[in-house]
Image (cartoon, rainbow, N blue to C red):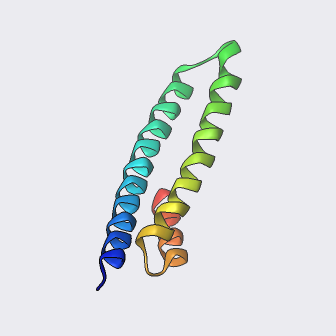
Amino acid sequence: MTREEILRQQLKAEQAETARELVELLRLGQEMGRRLCNETHGDMYDDVRMLISLLHQTRAQADLIDAKLSSTDPVADLMARRQNVL
C-alpha cells in the first residue's frame, strides 16, 4: 500500500468518526428539543416546533453522510437506523 493510499484511508476514518460524533450530538439536540417542546406553551410553541423540524432534517442528512462514510452497504445501514429511531 502506498503512502497516499494510507493517508486516504486515515482521512476517511477520521471523516467517519467525525460524522458519527455529529450524529450523536444531533441526536442529543433532538432529544433536548423534544423536551423543550413538551415544556413550551403559548407564543413560543411554533418557534420550538420549527427548531425540532430543522434538527430532524439536519440529523437525517448527518445520518446519510455517516452511512456513506462508514458502511459497505449505506442504504441498508440507513434503513436500519431509521427503523431504530421509530
Horizontal side of 31 relative to 48 (left or right) equals left
Task: Find residue 70 and report its image quarter.
Answer: bottom left
Q: Determine the residue positioned at 68% across, 32% down.
A: 50
Compared with 18, 68 (above or below) is below
Which image quadrant: the N terminus? Answer: bottom left
Compared with 66, 71 (above or below) is below
Compared with 6, 64 (above or below) is above
Compared with 22, 84 (above or below) is below
**How far across and down, in percent of the image, does residue 47 sit?**
68, 23
| Most foreground residue, 9 or 26 | 9
What is the residue that sits farthest to the top in this orientation? 43
What is the residue that sits farthest to the bottom in this orientation? 1
**How far across and down, in percent of the image, does residue 67 sit?**
48, 67
What is the residue that sits farthest to the front in this orientation? 3
| Most foreground residue, 27 or 12 | 12
**How far across and down, in percent of the image, does residue 4 sit?**
36, 75
| Most foreground residue, 19 or 36 | 19
